[in-house]
């Protein structure tokens, strides 16, 4: 397994207080933008935790054991995984994660299987413990020197530590809205509005991982494409093939693309992860063949 993130020392975090969002004097515009994006991740995770807590805390006994839309997992399994992902990331940051050569998908399945054998129900108190501990630790990662420190994350690639809350915000958002709740999931409960607070960090994580999560994906991107996502947290991004893979950047007029791929931020969280088929939720303007070759191969986690 790749090396885990370095252990966080309290004294180092305290030395980084000049990067507090309330003390931006003297920082470059790039530093200010990074801090703003980091706080978006914390806000998104906090909102997604509240959404999960509200829905999961209202489920009846029979609802827990219904099959979810996540293959092989019940609603209870998905709920256990959501809390466990917080523990996985916290353990990785503390250099305590033991995963052998497992990738993230196999690790998740293994841990859910183990939890299923030990827990017959979802415990609100345990979820609250996991959530509060994660918000505190991930909040510390928004300050330098940790925020911009890039670390390996199992088989998904190498990412700056400030993205840890974005990972969980995305995971909670998609599992709740696409795997547990209807119309794709089995339950008829209603989650809170899908707003920019919840979607911006989710989209940010997917875009950060697009160039890394799938080795070889770049071979399916033969010409530059533009990704246009409407709705909360949306925007325009250029996907450009390079000799090293794919570069994802905010749209620039100087970049000539062969096709524009249009969808919404909410739907992107589903079709980019193959929960929905892209052909039913995407409009392609331009070179259909070039766009389809890339979109058919895309499968983010």
Image (cartoon, helix red, strand yellow):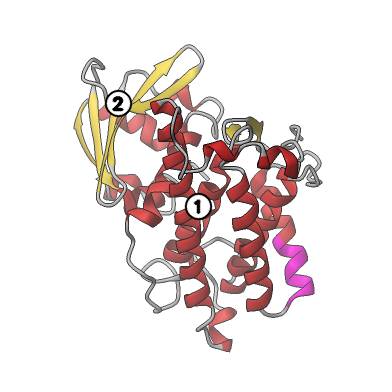
Crowd tier of the residue under label 2, counting other residues whose Cα lies within 10 Å: few below 14, some 14–19, many 20 or above: many
Viewer-closest of 235 and 145: 145
Can I make out residue 8 in this image?
A: no
Q: Which part of the image, by quadrant, shows the N terminus?
A: top right
Residue 195 rendering spot, x and y as whole percentages: 32, 58
Residue 225: mark in rendering: 2
In-image side of 79 versus 24 (left or right) = right
At 23% from the left edge and 31% from the top edge, which residue is drawn?
Answer: 260
Task: Tell me: residue 59, above or below residue 149.
Answer: below
Query: Quarter of the image holding residue 295?
Result: top left
At 63% from the left edge and 35% from the top edge, which residue is drawn?
Answer: 146
Give the farthest residue toward the top: 243
At 25% from the left edge and 51% from the top edge, which residue is drawn?
Answer: 231
Q: Name the residue under label 1.
A: 42
Mark 2–mark 1 Cα distance, whole angstroms, equals 30 Å
What residue range appears in magenta? 112-119
> CB under 8 Å between callouts 2 and 1?
no
Kind of element beneath mark 1: helix
Residue 45 rendering spot, x and y as whole percentages: 50, 57
Report the predominant secondary structure element of the magenta stretch.
helix
Task: Tell me: residue 183, above or below residue 3.
Answer: below
Residue 121 rendering spot, x and y as whole percentages: 68, 80
Going from N to C along the chain, the mark reached first, 2 or 1, is 1
């Amino acid at each position: 397994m790749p090396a885990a993130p370095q252990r966080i020392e309290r004294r180092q975090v305290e030395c980084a207080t000049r990067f507090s969002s309330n003390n931006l004097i003297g920082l470059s515009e790039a530093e200010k933008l990074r801090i703003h994006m980091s706080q978006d991740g914390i806000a998104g995770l906090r909102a997604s935790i509240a959404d999960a807590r509200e829905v999961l805390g209202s489920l009846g006994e029979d609802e827990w054991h219904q099959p979810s839309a996540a293959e092989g997992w019940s609603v209870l399994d998905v709920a256990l995984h959501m809390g466990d992902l917080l523990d996985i990331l916290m353990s990785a940051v503390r250099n305590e994660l033991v995963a052998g050569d497992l990738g993230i998908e196999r690790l998740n399945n293994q841990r859910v299987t183990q939890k299923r054998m030990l827990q017959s129900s979802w415990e609100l108190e345990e979820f609250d413990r996991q959530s509060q501990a994660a918000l505190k630790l991930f909040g510390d990662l928004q300050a330098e020197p940790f925020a911009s420190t890039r670390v390996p994350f199992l088989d998904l690639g190498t990412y700056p530590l400030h993205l840890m809350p974005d990972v969980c915000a995305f995971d909670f958002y998609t599992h709740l809205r696409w795997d547990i709740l209807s119309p794709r999931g089995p339950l008829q409960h209603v989650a809170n509005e899908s707003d920019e607070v919840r979607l911006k960090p989710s989209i940010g994580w997917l875009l950060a991982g697009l160039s890394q999560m799938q080795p070889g994906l770049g071979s399916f991107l033969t010409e530059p494409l533009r990704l246009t996502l409407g709705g909360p947290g949306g925007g325009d991004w250029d996907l450009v093939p390079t000799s090293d893979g794919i570069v994802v950047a905010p749209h620039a007029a100087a970049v000539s693309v062969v096709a524009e791929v249009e969808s919404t931020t909410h739907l992107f969280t589903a079709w980019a992860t193959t929960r929905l088929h892209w052909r039913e939720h995407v409009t392609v303007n331009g070179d259909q063949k070039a766009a389809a070759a890339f979109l058919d191969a895309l499968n983010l986690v």
